[in-house]
Amino acid sequence: MGGRAVSDEAAALTAKDVAGTPGAAATTEPAARRVILVGANPGVSLFDGDRLTAFASVWDVRWSERGSGRALVLWHDDQVRVVATDPELGYWLSQYFTRNFPEVSGVAWPEPIVERAEVVVEFDLASGLYVRASDVSVRMDGVLHRRIFATDDFVLAGVPHSLSNLFVPMRTAQITAKGRLLPGTIRLGGTPERPWSSAFIADAEVWRV
């Protein structure tokens, strides 16, 4: 996979340091919460029946308390792989955010394999998304809807966070790794007025704690 469990850049940080909330403790009053990350976070979950076969979390971080950069976090076959422009940032994104997302609730989440590489993130809110990171790629097509999502109760590791974004569910998606199309299909649901998909673009995303 071209990396080790933790890269040299990330090795100086313990899992607790990386996964912990940066700065002061969480503020319970939403209006007083501080911004910890701004960017985009598209994601895609693939299923075989009720079984999750793969999950990709794409990050285009424009600013955060851990810096900026791009990363792709891939869960597949009970392994976690992180490809990032900044390994420390990528490790933090995988351990603080992605591992606590409901999409991967209940699945094994071993120590990630982290690799430094260029991550190309291209998306158009009128059409779709393409991501390339090392030998992994993600593609989504067919915008179904565009709407604002906001909550003050998105829990990460037991701590409530405020999250807002522009949520754009997509009609089709695929993940390729090492030249192989990963198995599984996305799920579609919702209503004609408010369609939902397990493949989506999340832009203008702001996390506060």
Image: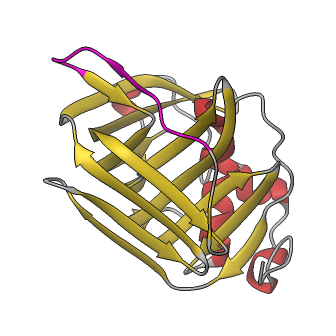
Stretch of the chain drawn in magenta:
184-194
185 in magenta: yes
Query: What's the magenta bit mostly, secondary-structure-wise?
Result: loop
User: Residue 196, image x and y in percent?
Assistant: 34, 26
Q: Residue 57, relative to residue 85: is it above or below?
A: above
Here the colouring is secondary structure
Residue 39 can be seen, yes or no: no
State which quarter of the image contains the N terminus: bottom right
Of 35 and 140, nearer the camera is 140
- In the image shown, does 162 or 109 lie closer to the viewer? 109
On the image, the x and y values in percent for residue 70 come to 47, 71
Q: Which residue appears at 54% of the width and 58% of the height?
A: 175
Q: Is residue 192 magenta?
A: yes
Can you tell which quarter of the image residue 63 is in? bottom left
Quarter of the image for residue 111 reads bottom right
Splitting the image into 4 quarters, where does residue 181 fall? bottom right
In the image, residue 76 sits, relative to residue 27, either above or below, namely below
Q: Residue at x 51, y 31 (%)?
A: 27
**Left of 185 or right of it: where is 197?**
left
Total numbered labels: 0
Q: Is residue 135 left or right of residue 124?
A: right
Furthest residue toward top: 191
Picture layout, residue 188 above or below residue 108:
above
Residue 100 x/y as whole percent: 66, 37
Looking at the image, is 132 positioned above or below residue 183? below
In percent of the image, x 77 and y 84: which residue is there?
2
Q: Position of residue 117 (x, y in %)?
A: 59, 85
Q: Residue at 56% across / 53% down in the picture? A: 56
